[in-house]
Each structure stands twice: as structure tokens, then as C-alpha cells.
Amino acid sequence: MKNDELNNQDKDIPNEDKQSLIGVDPLAWLSDEEKESVLNNNQTSQSDVDGGDQNQVANTYTVNLNSALTIRDVSELMDELNQIDDKHNEVIFESEQLEKVDTAALQLLLGFYLFATDAGKKVIWNKPSEALCHAVEILGLKEILNLKLMSA
């Protein structure tokens, strides 16, 4: 992308929002209508669900996020997310142990979340870790991911 294009994108961002951006906006590829649609049609809910696995309930798939979720882990996580098929109508992310998360991992989680909710699946963030909440807050993904942040 040319510097002129980057500068033009920068002009579209209000000054107060420029302070909160870190790097590139992960939602820049979404149009304003798509962002609005995601926010208005959010069909998932936050819930405190007891731990379990995909065998506990036939239509529920649990994704256990390890202590670190970085660009090195994205390929492995993507393989696991690709295993979730039409018979699973609910996906639970167990992230209580997550201590480190980067933007690449959040982009994958965002992409999966949008795909899953569009397909009518319920996505639950069970006991989101402080690291996950902080990263989501910094990137402005709280409403889109329907993630209730831990109280400070």
C-alpha cells in the first residue's frame, strides 16, 4: 500500500480514536455496513459455563486456549476450528488460562466468530482471561466479539 493511501485512511479516523489504535485496524477490511450488521445481529451470549469437552454435549464443541496464543499457534488453532462442523451449534472458548495473545490470534478468533455466528452457531467465552480482555479492549473488538470484560 502506498504512503498516500495510508495517509488517506488515517484521515478517516477521528483524532480521539487514533490514540487507541495499535498498528493496523483489524476491522479495516469490513465495510461500515458489515460492522453495523455484526453489532446489530449479534446472536451469541456471554455465559459462565462449567468446563467440559466436546463429548459432554453432542452439539457443543469446547476449544481450550492454552496459556499463549500467538502467531506461532494460529495454524494449530485454525486446524482445530476447522474441525467444528454443522453438527456443532455451540462453541465454547475456555480462555481462563490464556496469559498472552497477539493480534494474529485475535484476527483468527474474530474471523471464526463472524463465520460461526453467521452460520447460526452460539459462541460462548467462558471465563475470559485478563490478557484476552485487555487485548480485545485495546483493539476495539469488545462489542463485535460480544465479550464481557473482566472488572478491574
Image (cartoon, rainbow, N blue to C red):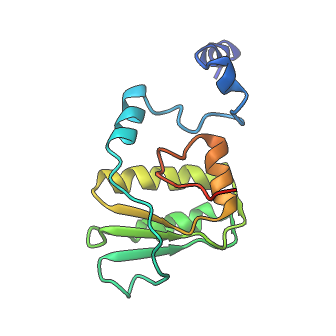
Farthest front residue in view: 151
Q: Is residue 132 above or below residue 1?
A: below
Indicate the quadrant containing the C terminus: top left, top right, bottom left or bottom right.
bottom right
107 lies left or right of 129: left
Q: Is residue 151 above or below residue 51?
A: above
Q: Is residue 139 above or below residue 7?
A: below
Q: Residue at x 35, y 48 (%)?
A: 42
- Residue 36 place in picture, x, y as percent: 38, 33
The answer to which image quadrant residue 11 occupies is top right
- Residue 119 place in picture, x, y as percent: 28, 55
In the image, 109 versus 20, the foreground residue is 20
| Residue 70 seen from this side | no
Q: Residue at x 44, y 61 (%)?
A: 46
In the image, 80 versus 38, the foreground residue is 38
Indicate the quadrant containing the N terminus: top left, top right, bottom left or bottom right.
top right
- Residue 61 place in picture, x, y as percent: 40, 75
Q: Residue at x 32, y 53 (%)?
A: 43
146 lies left or right of 152: left
106 lies left or right of 57: right
